[in-house]
Amino acid sequence: MIPLLLALLQTGEPPYTVDYLTPPEGDALEVGGMDFLPDGRLVVSTRRGQVWLVEEPLASDPADARFDLFVEGLWEGLGLTVEPDGDSGPKIFVLQRGELSLLRPNESGFIATVSDDWGLSGNYHEFVYGLPRDAEGNFYISLNVAFLSPKWWHGKSPVPWRGWVLRVAPTGETTPVACGFRSPCGIGMNAAGDLFVTDNQGDWMPASPIFHVKEGGFYGHPASLDWTPEYLESQAKASDTIPPERANDREPAAVWLPYKWSRSPGNLVPDVTGGKFGPFEEQLFLAELTNGMILRVQLEKVRGEYQGAVFPFLRDVGSACRVAFAPDGTLFVGMTNRGWGGRPPASGIARVRWNGTTPMEMRTVRLLQDGFEIDLTLPVAADCAITPDSVALTQYDYDYWWEYGSPERNTTAIEVTSTELSDDRRRLTVRTAGLTPAMMARLVLSGVVGVGGAPLHNDEFAYTINQLPEGEPTDQHVAKIVPPPPARESGAEGWLRLTYGDATDGWNHSGWELCDAELDPDDPTKLRTQKGVNALTNTLSDEPSDYVSKHVFGDASIHVEFLLPQGGKSGVRVMGRYAIELADREPMAAGVWHDLDVDFRAPRFDAEGNKTENAKFLRVKVDDVLVHEELELPEPSPGALGPEVALGPLVLVGTSGPVGFGNVRVRPAREADETKGWKRIFNGEDLDGWTISDDGLWYVEDETIVGEGPRSHLFSPRDDYRNVDIRAKVKIGDGGNSGLYFRTAYGPGWPAGYEAQINSSYADPQKTGSLYGLAPVKTHLIPPDTWFDYRVTCRDVEAGTHVVIRVNGVVITDYVDAERKYESGHIALQQHHDGSVIEVRDFEVRDLDAR
């Protein structure tokens, strides 16, 4: 691959070059750990359970590096370190999901367990990260919490020591050190040997932090408290939504990383290269996966505790998860984003080298009581004046709550009262009308130029002010305890997932495949695909079709994620008629997954079919940036499907070149509830008159029918329902399987009758919306633990029994049973198996024969 030159921003001579090693053909290096052997070889562990030895990793031509597969079959190596002078030569320590293992490069295949003293429940998200060592040879590892349910993805700690940092002695003795972590992907030491952890924003993490880890400290996420002596003794469990008692005593973040720079930080390493990497000795360099950046972090101690500033350093490097310095001062960057999302490249190894040119940068920042003292790497040009107007300074803080992340709160502009340059023009002192502790400070310098005309490459930093240097210390945090947001069921209410599970079942198409996709590094005008489930691409044919939904929609909110190659072009047609163009231009850059969100109002027609109101895009957003608002659509777009009607399909354009789509969801607007003829079939209080088969467990709670326990059925009091409408609000638990029966006969086992399937399990391919055994639906339209509207219409027609099943107001199944298998009977609910939980409320029926 041709080396890529990256400036620290877009201007000036590039002081750093970035190039990429060439991995073995057909292998994706999803890097989880890196270190160097004494002979200069690079050792790499991967998420795919491999360990590679790379010879000539520092070769002038990156293609000259040679990869040798040393070990495979491990379980997800997300940490690696080399002990260069072991008893019998170098030792390689690899952190697998279930153990810390010892490998010897001279004994291929030799594996010994150092420690496996932490729990595994089998949850997919129980990652384990590492692997720094202290001066005594102890290893440090950090453990991800589990995400057991998509109900807001609250982290849990079902087994020890999820959400903890552990210390593992060389003998294997394992000691819990600190708790309160969520997804601590990065763990490392600074130049002084102090331990730091990066965490990922989410529940109880308002943004991504860098924590200084202290023995016994609690860092904010409650789940891991379950394994503290206090919780174990009282048998208490941490709440999902209520801050724990230790919330006020939690350790503050040394640095909060702004969301625009970091959404998924990886590990961090100190620059102890002796100046081989530029003018940032002993500062930390941080891998950032989602935004594809390398960040620079400079810490200082204020009142004896670490806090400091973060700066952008390099952009568009790739999905950086791991960084490590080579002996010659080259920064190696390991990339992975499978299942996590990030910038291309999605895997592989990059090298960042300094060419000896000193960039014009803010090198260090020191907090003053009323401002900042900023040291620059080069003197400011003699003709460059820095005034208070050159400085934009704001402060803000975050919410500490169970919600996923937090917006920046209480944003306040801070008046800059003076600016002063030192005699050598290398130090800038910025004074303000006053700074507030327990707040972030964002400072932007404009128009600053160094000697020789060198521009300031990065003009911004964010400083975490936990404490000011003087005055009364504060007991507040940057992330402040606030009243919790309103309780929600899952965040998915009302939505239909059109590409989850079987992503092709609900669509008409040709030339499309379900896969993983990224830019083709050899031809970035194309997409490179591999086996996977994260993208739908039109890459199976030279002449693919559009991807057209079988279901039709009117008023709706629509969410689509998309990936374009360089120069790529595609689009989305709402109702098959109203087009939104997607093209490789700002803000839709190539090689990056983008979010498209649309609020749409369909055209209106009178009783004679005459249009009375035009269609309208109420809002169109790309990556949460508003693009269109209240945009009226008097005419359909070119290439529209069919005549103008009140309902139409969603079309993903596949005929304009290669494109990837994913996570397609639609939330139909709710229609006003009909009332005429509807009667409650369940009184909301008890199950009097209902019949339970097979000793099942059915009961009423909060006006809701609940079924759990072993397989059973709950039969309505009436047994003569024939031509009916049935509607209810339904929720099925994770892994649950149920059904709404109609025209069914009472009896044990599996009763005869039609069944509208209700299913969140993976065992049965017939999902919610299926007419069981007759018209299967294979797409997981509704996530578990999410209320949805279910409506079934059954009536006799000349051709047979006509059954229509609607989910959230959309027709999913429209089927005529020519055999008229069932004539009349009960309405019933099914509880399929132990572990399944079905909930039903607002259960109503309408007799169509009486209308």
Image: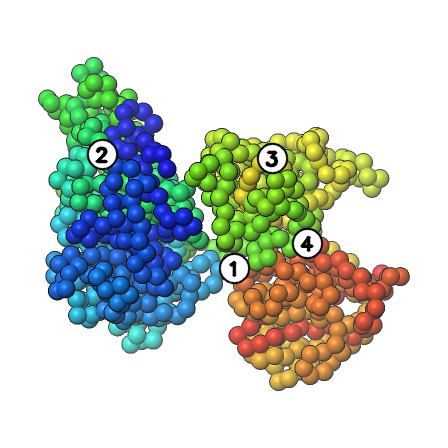
Q: State the separation of the CA atoms marked 4 and 1.
A: 19 Å
Res 78 seen here: no
Look at mark 2 in the image and give the residue it sits on. Answer: 354
Instruction: Report which quarter residue 116 is drawn in.
Output: bottom left
* Circle 3: element type: loop
Look at mark 1 in the image and give the residue it sits on. Answer: 489
Q: Badge 4: few (under 14), some or many (20 or more) residues near its Cα, within 10 Å?
A: some
* Circle 4: element type: loop
The quarter in which the N terminus is drawn is top left
Q: Mark 4 near mark 1, Cβ–Cβ under 8 Å?
A: no
Which residue shows up at 34% across the image and 27% down it? 10
Q: Which of marks 4 and 3 is in front?
A: 3
Mark with earlier residue (4, 1): 1
Which residue shows up at 72% across the image and 44% down it? 647
Q: Badge 1: few (under 14), some or many (20 or more) residues near its Cα, within 10 Å?
A: few
Look at mark 4 in the image and give the residue it sits on. Answer: 809
Residue at the farthest top position: 383
> In the rendered view, does 121 fall on the left or right side of 780?
left
Residue 410's place in the image compared with 828, above or below, is above
Q: State the separation of the CA atoms marked 1 and 3.
A: 40 Å
Give how far across and how far down residue 171 sits, in percent. 17, 70
Q: Which of marks 1 and 3 is in front?
A: 3
Which label was assigned to residue 57?
A: none
Q: Nearer the viewer, mark 2 or mark 4?
A: 2
Which residue shows up at 63% across the image and 42% down it? 544
Q: State the separation of the CA atoms marked 2 and 4.
A: 59 Å
